[in-house]
Image (cartoon, grey):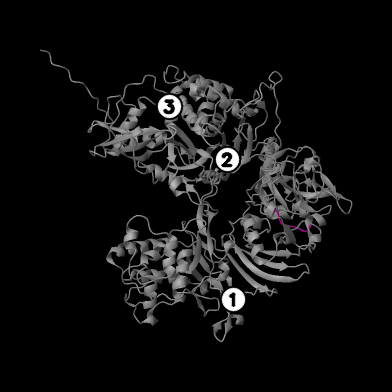
Amino acid sequence: MNGIKPSYANAVANVVSTTSSWGMGKPPTLASQVKELSHPTPTSMTLTAALYLLAPLKESSDVYLMTRSYMQNWLIWAYNQNVPKMENQRVQTALRLAATRLGLHPPEVGFKYNDPGPVDNSSLSLEGSPLLLNPCVIVQDLISDNAISGPKSPNNNLGPRARSLPVSPGSVNGSDEVETQPTDEDLDRDGDQILCCAVPAKFYELLRSTIGITCVNGRDITFQPYVQEAGPYQGALIHHHPLASNDEKEAPTPMSRNDPSCQMNGIAKTPCRPLEFRRKIIMKRKLKRFTSGEIDESSPMTRLLKEEEQRAAPELVPTVEVRPVKLQYSVIDGNNIRRREGIVLVSQTSRVYDALFWLMKVAAPNTSSSCKRIWSKRDTTGTASGDGYELVDLNFLDGKMEKDSEKEKEFQPPRKLVGEWLRAHYYENTKRDCDIIIEVRKSNDKWLRASLELENRILVGDYVDAQDAAGNWYESIVTHVNDDTVTVHYFGWASRWNGRLRRRQDSPVPASIAKLHCAAPLWSHSSRWRERIAEGNTVEVRSASSKVDRPKWYKGIVKRIGQKRVVMKRVTGGAPLEMIVGKDEKKRPLLLLNRVQQIMVEVPQENDKMEDEEEDLARKLRDDVSIDTLTTMDTFKPQPPFLRWVNLYGEEICEFGTHMKSNGGLNVATLQYEVESHRKPVEIMKSFNNMYGQGFMKESLRGIPPAPGSVGMHNLGNSCFINSIVQCLNHMEPLTQYFLNGDYAKELNRRNPLGSGGRVATAYAAMLKEIWSNKYSALAPRMLKQTVASFAPQFNNSYQHDSQEFCQFLMDGLHEDCNRVKEKPYVEELEGIGLEDAKAAIEAWRKHLLRHDSIIVDRCQGMHRSHLTCPKCGKESVKFDAFSTISLPLTADKTNINGMTLQDCVDKFLEGEQLDELNAWYCPSCKKHVCALKMIALWSVPDILILHLKRFQFDHCTVRNDVIRSKINDTVRFPIERLDLRNHVLGPIYDDAPPIYRLCGVSEHMGPTANSGHYTATVRNCKDSRWYRYNDAHVGETTADAAVTGGAYLLFYERLKGSARWGGMEKLMKERNAEPYGGPNTDQDGFTTVKSKKKRH
């Protein structure tokens, strides 16, 4: 190696010994590579191994920030190293990939470089505060063309190459003309901006162990990890740095670069902390395409596109977390003495429970968990007394109601994240720090700060968060306090809904409120939506004509936001409100925190009831009166009722979703069931075999469902497998609308011998109409079950069945009942060997349409290409076959601590396999059945994609001559919002309907085998896009993540954008001018095969 220091050359890029093992099979484990990198020898380390650590960054990856100049120089240096010929191509490819990921210039011959020295990241941190990012630093986004800036950065829109580093051709041998080389100042800065890039933690640790890292004092170099980065808490705490300690057992680590305690005769007395710390990759919302000022806001098309973008699921991109949350803590003992102080950094995406639990563990390591607790500072307390700090109950961060059964009481850490928790503490969305007090005591002592706990200082008139009987949290005001209970008034609700809560967690209270928690600090569980309101937001507005005790609520749009005031302006008109008596004995409307600020809202529903003259006046006032005029008037007048001013912190408005649903309908607080008098439930049999749903005659119950189409289904005796599949199919909107609109009736094929004469389709349509009638809270699917059982005897019993088998039968039954083909011709199978794939696929699909043509074929069927090869004679066969469900094998060999992914299962499905004897293929050349080699590929995929996870295994026991059934319960991590199959589809892909899907439903199974246990469903409602869990007749709101369990069995996906009939085959046929419905002997070019006539003799 020319121009390279021998020590570094030996440490990083010397003789190749692992080339053969890397070239064949899998690379060595990462642990063995890191071991080699940490203890290099002249025959064990390769440059390829170092570059292998510069892998792509993924969500939750650990990264470090480095200056771009250093990384650019390192890549050029690595490019110019002498490596064996067989390794050279791999090194150059790895270098180009690394440069592309980091947004740097790919190294080329002629670029100058220096020998890499210790990593110096001093330019990334503030002088004297290494834990704070320099305001000039700009970190590039990993995917998008945007950049993420530190605080006060003047430019927030740099592309990946907009600020590329200047590199100049020169000697590749390390010329001594140092004065001609660009300095760090030239390379790192452009104006006052410092560009840097994120590298994987393993690569950074390699550099630290081989060439060292500059410490905060600017002089010392360390080769070891900083001691505070070690420990079991590093997954929850990014970094911990103690500042001061009065405890003799602990000594602080120096912070400042000029701290004399770090030096002794030029030698470091204690290990100095190296610059830069571990950061996380988090998923952040991608910036919206439409922003004000860059396009015509008045254009109808613009408004339409903006509405479509708002309805679409947010696109998330992996991004470096530039500013982690800083928690500055103080440990206070029973004598009010500060024992220790320090700082910890945590990721916004970490769980609050984990972060605070480990914070207490590292800040007070020698104290029992029962003798320490944590307080956090908030910018608003809502109470008349207190010092601004509120006690944090780690077990109660989610605010859920108390559990009933002992099994439910098993502790599960709350899932609230640090970012969400911090936004509840402060008005500023961008705030990234919080002051923490850790209070410790001796085992028999009382808590020093007991008097400051909310339960001990709460008074009448305090503003708090309170839970109602349904478990929801609202902003509230305390109206009465006694020793054991507290009475509160919920903002936005009439006084008849006032609630009573326990004052302390151990207070004796009636059973009706035993499950409710005590009052909590204001905005700890409710939203600070009032402070963050903006023009264009949707709110609930109390109707101007409603009664005080029975208000009506309409949807309103915020049009103007008034000034923050010291004196409240009088608002005339509007809705009548309840009044409270203040300290001056005067009645006035209730205002949260006594804040006085008004907003103008538009209520279209009240506009519909206005006379023409009033509407003209309203329009004139809205168009002519400026915001300055409106906010300076002594009295805010209605303009008229549909456009009026309301108090932002009053009870005339509520957060949208408090009383109304997202579609504008009213939310119901409880479900009221109504059973018809002549159809009372009758007890006919006690359950004797513990079968699900056995024991009672179940009838449909009238009531209001929790959401349109979210109706429970009674279990009619192990019929949960039916309920699970129907709930998933019910919210596949293209299919459901076909039956609800009556389109199926026009296409019923009553003469199809393979169908049911239209009975299955009719029963299914009747079931859907009842579900969407909004009249029932639970239905008994008796007619559907009986109809299916009459045509499929295997379901004519009370046994449990495989939901995948029922799904397949139901889809086939609906297809045959609605098949548009009345007379099915005989069609021979197409052999695709020797044909172009597209031509063979078109011909195969045309033959398929001759016998199968229905809504199921249009929306639910795709086509795969199978390639068979005889292992003996090499005979090949290519066939294109239609499918409606893809059965994915579970990759048991890949199960690990993180579980397997859906991508792993898809890759396993597409791998080649050798058929067993039970599935042998008849080779026309060998004239016998052979265990052929089979390759499957996806040619086209439908709008509605059903994936079957093959959890159940059947093994033959030779000892007992029996079949052993088992189930794989491992969790498969599948995507919720974006399943991208573009890399797996061989056929044409169209931009207006790409094979990208979002999850709509999951059929779940609990139990040892498919024919036992219980089936449930977790489904996204196609109207309000919320997720609901269906457990027979019980329906409850949930989240999509709750479906990612070891019980997920069938996954129902729907195409995210556009629609492609026949999986895109319709468009392909149009492009090729192929007639889809040709005769049985007509090819795609329009030619018909004609039999030759025999000559007469």
In this view, 1019 is above or below 1089: below
Q: Which residues are magenta?
A: 561-568
Between residue 557 and residue 511, name the one nearer to us.
511
In space, the residues marked 2 and 1 are separated at their CA atoms by 50 Å
Q: Magenta stretch: residue 399 in it?
A: no
Q: Which mark is residue 854?
A: 3
C-alpha separation, residue under disc 2 versus residue under disc 3 = 28 Å
Please tell me which residue is depicted at 29% across the width and 36% down the height of the picture. 878
Label 2, on which residue? 1025
Of residue 694 and residue 322, the one placed in the foreground of this image is: 694
Taking 152 as reference, is 1054 above or below it?
A: above
Q: Residues within 10 Å of mark 3 (few under 14, many from 20)?
A: many
- Which mark sits nearer the N-terminus, 2 or 1? 1
Q: Secondary structure at mark 1?
A: loop
Using residue 1019 as the reference point, say whether residue 37 is left or right of it. Answer: left
Residue 658, label in figure = none
Q: Earlier in the sequence, mark 3 or mark 1?
A: 1
Name the residue carrying label 1: 128
- Quarter in which the C terminus is drawn: top left
Q: Circle 3 sits in a helix, a strand or a loop, which is it?
A: loop
Indicate which label's residue lies in the foreground, 2 or 1. 1
Locate the N terminus by quadrant.
bottom left
Outermost residue, right side: 585
Query: Per the image, is 565 magenta?
Result: yes
Eyeballing the image, is 701 above or below 81? above
- Quarter of the image for residue 848 reads top left
Disc 3 marks a residue whose amino acid type is Ser
Question: How far apart in space, not on screen, are marks 3 and 1 (Cα)?
Answer: 72 Å
On the image, the x and y values in percent for residue 583 come to 87, 54
